[in-house]
Image (spheres, rainbow, N blue to C red):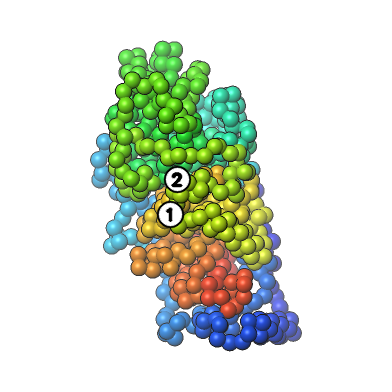
Amino acid sequence: MATKGNPGDNRNNRSPMSVFIIVGLCGFFYILGLWQRSGFGKGDSIAVEITKHTDCSVLSDLNYETHHDDDFGTSDGSDIQVKEFKPCDNRYIDFTPCHDQMRAMKFPRENMAYRERHCFPDEEKLRCLIPAPRGYATPFPWPMSRDYVPYANAPYKSLTVEKAVQNWIQYEGNVFRFPGGGTQFPHGADAYIDELASAIPLDNGMVRTVLDTGCGVASFGAYLFKKNVIAMSIAPRDSHEAQVQFALERGVPAIIGVLGTIMLPFPSEAFDMAHCSRCLIQWGSNDGIYMKEVDRVLRPGGYWVLSGPPINWKMQFGAWQRPEYELEEEQRQIEETAKLLCWEKKYEKGETAIWRKQLQSGDCTERETLPTMCATTDSDDVWYKKMETCVTPSKPTGPWKPFQERLNAVPSRITSGFVPGVSVEAFEQDNRLWKKHVNAYKRINKIISSGRYRNIMDMNAGLGSFAAALESPKLWVMNVVPTIAEKANLGVIFERGLIGIYHDWCEGFSTYPRTYDLIHANGVFSLYKNGCNAEDILLEMDRILRPEGAVIFRDQADVLVKVKRIVKGMRWNTKMVDHEDGPMVSEKMLFAVKQYWVAGDNTTSSE
């Protein structure tokens, strides 16, 4: 059964003698470290001040009590009173600040514009803590979580009724069970994926990243993990309550999203494959604009799978209860757009068709007319940019490599010079550095690799080396590249066989509350120091973090002092830790755990 809390709760109960010994050893090794660095004067004063106050005992896990609750000194010596953040009203338990249902109804319905991101302005933002529902439980570990979700975590039964005959989801006692079925795979996701694998190389690592549009509860993405394939599943927040929430509770990557009027928050040529299983997207409409957007995010040589209407409409129009002429026209538009994009149809059987994008830009011989090519010089500049009915030119690309080789190989975007300022040597150095950082994290938080953390987010992912160092079947990482950072890096992350997204941390993330187990924030608050309020970023982190989830901050010491002061009023336990290279390095780490508390409950796990 799922349980509340982390495994292995072994909080320290130290005797006065053991405390004396530890303090003595801390002092000895601190002085020894200073002596080895040739004395005072080489480190900054803030780092030294923090080290004096830091409890240097080894943290066996992150279920600890804060032994030094006093705040560390700030750079200006001021004594600012800690602000206590109150719980939000219980009606905000599943609040999604940029996908609010009531707010969405104010926007046009044409082309699904009302289902896109529409964030609250600053003056209307909630500045309180989103509560967990009563009875909230730690999710089951993977792979059990793929099939079972505690009912209390997402207590919505509408899908069990609406999709009862399609085997999406079943309610059994105090859990939901996910049998692995779907509208287009009545024999189960495994059988459906095996059918696709007869035409697409899903078994040898060549196809690693997949975009699943209109994902439902993401059973397709959940079962792709068996083949070491990772899918970015997207679905709108619509009348089918909590689709994306169910996906993330199961431990499957997903975001709230829709193909509407703005470009998807991914770089060009990111995914090895794109998939639509009866996702109800009008692919042929608007001059094929949605297929052209898929073409933009699909790698040269990538595959597009369309399963359901209008494929094989002659045999199925009666069952679909749609006019024959309408489905015929829809298929005609899709086939014409595919030919314009120079996609080759590789497979069609039953209600499933598969196309492949040309591998090289000069390979197209079938199209009769040339498409309008996009004029933009930066096809990765997509944040809130309108979709266009043009075709994105392909970049020169290297040969496809299987996943494990891709993970640490130098991406062709770097060797081809598409990432300004990042050389082959810089990439390799970044890789080595993050292996070192992650090893340091694991020494402090010993449960990182245990399977306790499934859904992990890197808020400022850089080149994706944090995720590469953590790579394991037990977990996945959502690599977020802030829109104010170097945007070209997200393409590098995808080329490594990892997934990610562009995002502006001044706004809410496109997910439900309580959907991440571990958040990594490297340099985020230094990056946004002139961008937006640190409180708002931390409150958003609190919203998307599970009860008893963990956060690792890495930043300059004075920045972390301020962060620590804010989160002290957010029901988080914190611990400041020196850089792995010693106390004289000004960069520090702040480890935090969100306490367990639920709606209507004033107690927490640490009380």
Position of 17 with respect to 198 (left or right) is right
The image quadrant that residue 181 belongs to is top right
Picture coordinates of residue 491, whole percent (x, y) = 46, 47
Position of 281 with respect to 271 (left or right) is left
The C terminus lies in quadrant: bottom right
Position of 572 with respect to 82 (left or right) is right
Relative to 368, residue 229 above or below? below
Amino acid on which the number 2 mark rests in the picture: Ile
User: Dot 2 lies on which element?
Assistant: strand
Picture coordinates of residue 446, whole percent (x, y) = 67, 62
Mark 1 vs mark 2: in front: 1
**Residue that appears at 45% across and 82% down:** 75
Q: Which residue is mark 2?
A: 255
Residue 528 in sight: yes
Amino acid on which the number 1 mark rests in the picture: Pro
* Number of marks present in the image shown: 2
The image quadrant that residue 400 belongs to is top right
**Residue that appears at 62% across and 70% down:** 580
**Residue that appears at 31% across and 55% down:** 120
Q: Nearer the viewer, residue 59 or 182?
A: 59
**Residue that appears at 49% across and 72% down:** 556
User: Dot 1 lies on which element?
Assistant: loop
Relative to 310, residue 452 above or below? below
Query: Is tag 1's residue or tag 2's residue first in the polypeptide sequence?
Result: 2
Q: Nearer the viewer, residue 190 or 146?
A: 190
What is the CA distance from the residue labelled 1 to the residue labelled 2? 29 Å
Picture coordinates of residue 212, whole percent (x, y) = 47, 36
Relative to 265, residue 189 above or below? above
Q: Which residue is mark 1?
A: 420
